[in-house]
Every structure is written in structure tokens, then in C-alpha cells.
Image: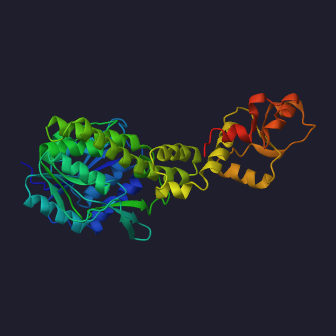
Amino acid sequence: MSDVKLSICIPTYNRADFLTKALTYFVETYEIPYNYEIVISDNASPDNTAEVVENFIAKGLPIRYFRCQENLGIEPNLASAFRHARGEYNIYASDDDMLVMDGLIEAISYMDKNPDLVVCYAPWYLHNEQLSVDHGTFYTVDNDVKFKHRNFMSVFNFLIDQHVFPEVGIYRSAALRAAWVPRYFAYWAFSHLAHYLDIGAVAFLKKPFYRAVIVSKIVRDRPQLGNEEVMTAWDRYRGGLEYFLYVGAKRGAIEQTADSRALYDEAIKQFTLTRMGVAMRFWAARKDYVRAYELYTRLLLGGHRNNPEVTQISRSIHLMAAVQTLSWLVNASAEVNRLVLYGVADHASLESLLREVGLRSDVAVISYEPDQAPDVIERSAVFLNDAADRDVFVARGFPPNLILSDADITRAILP
């Protein structure tokens, strides 16, 4: 039988610099008071990841290293790390994040004292590594709370009421073997939680044991997997919560009357809409106003007109989505290299907005000139302030479907 208390499971791919930083914390900072191992699963990295691992093994770190034959994707690589783990407890650690030692030690002590627990969750810090400061936690737990085996209804209400995302946990190996399975349309954190609760008790602790690095010392503006998930996963959140209820219903712990199902559906709807509001803000911050507008319409339909996210964006979303729609239509037209503005009062301001939302740099924004050559006309789009001027441009030979009026654009951007 293994005497390893904790397996710290690190999936990685082509990020030797990040992995170096992560492993350096084990050498210089972390003090782990029991036997542990670091299980690294390498998704066939083409860089010097293997060399980095060998260097840290030489420094005495208890690393077990496994390399996939090909890049299997993020979730299979994480599963690989977990399947190779030998510890009593397992925790995932990203190759660019950090552990919080006092929280980790306290959480494991809590699990030792509660042998019926199969997983222990906690919120995580959002950390600026360049400034060495935390910017709050992703969610909050007011007090440590333990839920008994198959107490699905109480856990469901807790998730909904607290807006909890059970993503960072310490897992008992005996439960992880059965609970960590692939799920695609049902968000993994909710579906896995259902399986853990089906096996034993689960807990949510107030004190974090993990830091998610949002600003890194290595690359300041690197892509954030968590951010990408927030921007696209709202319907999978719904799927995960519905899957959670399904497992509870199959175990006889969730009532299945028509009235109760309507209540569950409304609770999940409001949870999902709230997450869509966050996604809308992220898309707007990325200056993708068309996607933000799509979410805006769903939020309004769902009754979230007073949602702070909606209120904040409502002043500008219609204009920016309309300008970006015009930009997209021009960009999507092969060989078009001019956009003629006609009847526009502030040419410079509109051009500035078009550039801001992504109009191709090779597309010249120009005013109308009556003597334009036929080959120039063939490669020009036209934006008209007044649709009544359309016939003039059709008569001069401009491509009819590239003559776009303000009414054409705004018809699809409803107030």
C-alpha cells in the first residue's frame, strides 16, 4: 500500500517556463508536512518540458513524470495525471497557478477528521503574481459546511444561492477513481460533484487552498482557460446542474413532481442568466460587441433588465454592435478594399469606431467621389446614412449587396 499522503497532479503542454516557476515554489516556498508526490502528465510537449522535469528531480522533488504519445487535449491530460496518482488524496494544480499551504494543510486535516468525506472544496484566490497580491476569491463561503451522503437537494440549493463553482477540490482517491469521468454537455464540475455526493459526504470550506494566477510573471497577457470557459460555457452550466438533479432523482433524493421541476428549471434559468451576464461583460471587454449583444438580448428576454451587467452595457451596446456588424460585413467580402461613407456627419469618428471594432487595416475608409473608376467601384462597399440614396449608387454600378444603409444595419440591432 502506498504511503503517499497527497498527490499534486499537474497536467502540462508546451509551457516549460511556467512549469519551471510552478516547481520552483516546491523547492523554495512550500513546506508540505507529509509524504507527497508531484504527478506530471505531459501532453506531448515539443519544448524542453522533459528536461525541466529532470532538473527538478535532480533537486530532490518527488516527481513522477508521464508523457502522452500525442496531444490528447486538456481534460484527458488531467485525467492522465489523476489516474497515475498514488496518494490518499489528490489535488489538481495548474502549471501556472499556486497552492496556499496553510489552507491546504487545514483542509487535509479536516478530511482526516471526517473519513466519510470524499471531496473537500474551497473558493480560490484570484492572484496578481507580478504585484504579489490577491484580488478576492472567485466565490465565497461564509462558513465551513458539510453535506451528508446523497443530500442532493441541500447541495443544489447551496450551489444556486451562493453561486458556487465546485472546481477546486481535494479528492479522496477511492472516490475519484469512479467519479472523474468524461462529461461534455454537462459541465464537469457539477456532474462530477453529483458523482462524489453519490459516493459519500462533500464539504465546502471557507478558507482557500489555491491561487489562480490572473497576471503572471512569465507572460502578462497570456490566455486564461478560466476566462474562456466563462465566456462560452453558460449552457453547459445549465447542463451540469440538470445532470446533478438527474443523479439525485435516480437516487430518490430529488422530488420529481411537475411543480418541483418547474422550480428547479426556474432556479437553473436564473443561475445561467447571471453567468451569461458575466460572459457578456467579458465579450464587451474584448470588444466583441456582436457576441455581447446576442447575450444582451437573452438577458432582457429572461427578465434581467436591471442586472448590473445589463445596465452598464445598455448605453453603448446597440451602437457598438451596429458598427461592428458593418465592419464584419465589409471584412467578409473578398477583394473589397474600400468603404465609402456617404451622408455621414462625422466621418472621422465613425472611421475610428470601425477600426476599434476590427475593420481590416487594408480597407480604406473614404468619402464618395463621383469619378471613381469601374474597377474601384467593383471593390467598394458603401455605407449610407439615408436609404433613399441607395438608387444613386446602384445606378453607378456599385455592387447592390454591398450598399448598406443605416436602416439595413440597425434593423438587426433591436433596442
Residue 342: x and y, percent? Answer: 83, 44
287 lies left or right of 207: right
> Viewed as shown, does residue 278 lie left or right of 388?
left
* Residue 66 visible in image: no
Q: Is residue 168 above or below residue 257?
A: below
Q: Which residue is nearer to you in this view: 55 or 262?
A: 262
Residue 11 seen in the figure: yes
Q: Is residue 71 left or right of residue 292?
A: left
- Name the residue: 90% across, 33% down: 373
Corner quadrant of residue 46 = top left
Position of residue 105 in the picture relative to residue 99 (left or right):
left
Residue at position x 37%, y 37% in the image? 71
The x, y position of residue 72, in whole percent, is: 35, 36
Q: Quadrant of residue 235?
A: top left
Q: How far across and how far down the image is residue 396, in percent? A: 88, 30
**From what the image shows, is residue 161 above or below residue 335?**
below
So how many labels did they put on this image?
0
Given residues 48 and 346, the one toward you in this image is 346
> Which one is nearer the viewer's eye here, 215 or 369?
369
Residue extending farthest to the right is 371
Q: What's the image's color scheme?
A: rainbow
Residue shown at 28% from the left, 46% from the top: 189
User: Residue 313: x percent and y percent?
Assistant: 55, 55
374 is higher (above) or lower (below) than 345: above
